[in-house]
Image (spheres, grey):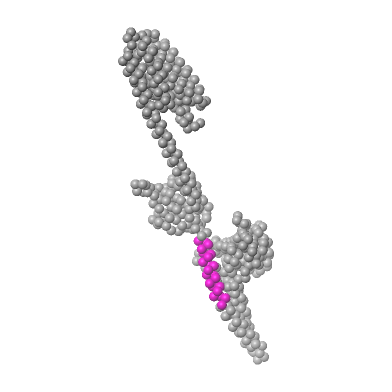
Amino acid sequence: MKPGADTLFRKLAWLTLFRLVMVTVLLGGTALTDLGWTGELADGPGPLYALIAGTYVVSLVFAVALRARRGLVALAYAQVALDVAIATAVVAITGRSESVFVFMFSLGVVNGAILLYRRGALFGAALSLLAYLPLASVGVRTPAVLTVFAHGSAFLATAALAGYLAEQLRRTGEKLAESETDLATLSALHEAIVQSVSSGLLTVDREGRITFLNRAAEQVTGLALDAVRGEPAARWFSAFTPSTSRGETNLVNERGERLRVGYTVSELVSREGAPLGSAVIFQDLTRLRAMEAVVQRSARLADLGRVAAGLAHELRNPLASMSGCVELLRGGASLSAQDARLMDIVLREAARLDQLVTRFLQFSRPTPPRREQADLAEIVRETLEVFARDPAAARVQVVPALVPAPAWCDPDQVRQILWNLLLNAAQAVAGARSGDGAAGTVRVAISAEADGGASVLVEDDGPGMSAEEQAQLFTPFFTTKAKGTGLGLATVQRIVDAHGGLVTVESEAGRGTRFVVRFPPATPSLAAG
C-alpha cells in the first residue's frame, strides 16, 4: 500500500469509529427522551431508533469493506455521503429547518475535508445544500429564505475554511515527510560514515556512561554496544584519561589480548556550547609498534654488523699468528711440562676465540638465503630428531604439534633458527629446574597463516624474562647465561629479516617465554630471489 493510501485508510478507520461513538451518544439521548420527554417528536422515538440501527449496520459494512483495503477513495466519497444522509435524516426527524441538529451537515463537510481535502469539502457542501433545501421548503407556508441562506452560507464557509486548513495540513505533512526522509538519509549516511571509520570511536555522556561504540571499537575491545550502553566507561576504559587530549596506553580487551592503543579525547558540546560528554578516538597500535621495534632493531644490527665485520678481520689475523707461534714454541725439545700445559691452555682459548670470531663473522655477513619450496613440518621434525641427541635436551620434554605448512625458505637457515631457539629454551628450563630434578617442557608448534604464510612457535615453561631483558634480547653480545655469547638470537633476527619474516617474543617473569617466527607467503619477487 502506498503512503497516501495508508494515510487515507487510517482516516477512514478513525472516522468510522467516530461515527459509531456519535450514534451511540444519539442512542443514549433517544433512550432518555423515550423515558421522560416526549414533546418534540411527533412520531415518537421510533424513527430515531431505526436511524441508529441503520447507521450501525452501514458502519459495519464500511468496516468490513475497509479490511480489503481496496477502493479507498470511493469508500471516502461514500463515507461523506453517509454522513450527509445521517444529518438529513436527523434534521428531518427533529424539525426540518428549525431543527437544532442542522450543524450535523457541517460535520459531513468537515469529514469530507479530512478525507479528501478541498475536493472532499466541496463535495460535502454540495450534498448538504442539495439535501437541506427540500427540508427547508417542505411544510412551511412562506419559504424561509433567510434561514436557507444562513445555513447554506454556513455550509459553504465551512467547506472553504475546512478545505483550506486541510490543504495546508497536507502540504505541512508532505514537507514533514520530506524532512523526515532527509533526516533518515542523513542519519543513515552519518551511521555509515561512523561505522566505516577504521579507528575505534567511543562516546560517553557527562556522567561518564557509554553512549556509543562503532564497529571498529567493538572489534578492538571485544565489547558489544548493546551490552555496555549506559554502563560506566571507567569499567573498561579507565586507561583513557579525560584530562589528556592524546596519548598511548596499554589496554587488555575482553579476549584477554594486551594491546598498545593510541587515543585522542575530545569534548562534545551542543550548538549552544553546553557540554554533552566526551568522544574518544583510538587505534590499535600493537603491530605498528612491534614493527617499529623490529625496524629499529634491524637497523642497530646492521650498524653493528658493519663494525663487527672489520673488527673480526682485525682480530682473526693476529690471532692466527699467535696460534702459529705458540705451536712452534710448543714443539721445542727443551719445553718443560708446566710450560707445555700453559701453551695448551693458550691454544685452547685461541681456538675458542677463533670460534667466536667465526660466529661473529657469520652474524655480521649472513649468507643470503637460498629459498625453495619446503614443508616446515618436515624441517622441524628433522631438527627435533637431531636435537634429542644433544646433551642440552637431556632434561627437557619436547612436545611437538606439527601440521603441514608450506613455506618458501632456506631449509638450512630455518634449521639454524630452530636450533638456536630450542637451545635457548632448553637452557632456560634446565637452569630453572637445576635444584628439583624435574624435567621442563618445550612446546613446538606449526600453524598455517590465513594469508598463505606460516609460523613456528617455540614455547618453554622456564623462568621467563623481565621487560628490560626483552628490550635487549636481540642485541649482539647481550646474554643472561654464564657461558653464552649473545649472538644466537641476534643471528635468528638477521636470518628472519633476510627471509622478510617477523620474530616476536612474549615473556613474563615466572611464566615462561614464547617465540613466534612468521614466514611470509611465497610471492613472485621472493621466488625470483
Residue 220 is covered by the magenta coloring: no
Q: Residue furthest bottom?
A: 334
Residue 294 is covered by the magenta coloring: yes
Quadrant in which residue 344 is drawn: bottom right
Say if residue 426 shows up in the picture: no
Residue 112: percent from left, percent from top: 41, 24
Q: How many marks?
A: 0
Residue 325: percent from left, percent from top: 62, 86
Which residue occupies 48% across, 44% down?
226
Which residue occupies 43% across, 58% down?
247
Which residue occupies 47% across, 23% down?
75
Q: Compared to 316, does 496 lie above or below?
A: above
Q: Nearer the viewer, residue 58 or 352?
A: 58
Say if residue 124 shows up in the picture: yes
Quadrant in which residue 159 is drawn: top left
Q: Compared to 53, does 475 lie above or below?
A: below
Q: Quadrant of the C terminus?
A: bottom right
Magenta stretch mostly in which secondary structure? helix
Q: Compared to 192, does 16 lie above or below?
A: above
Quadrant in which residue 444 is drawn: bottom right
Residue 13: percent from left, percent from top: 46, 26
- In the picture provided, is 445 more to the left or to the right than 151? right
Q: Compared to 321, does 383 lie above or below?
A: above
Residue 81: percent from left, percent from top: 44, 19
Q: Nearer the viewer, residue 328 or 464?
A: 328
Which residue occupies 66% across, 88% down?
331
- In the picture provided, is 262 more to the left or to the right than 513? left
Q: Nearer the viewer, residue 275 or 178?
A: 178
Q: Which residues are magenta?
A: 289-310
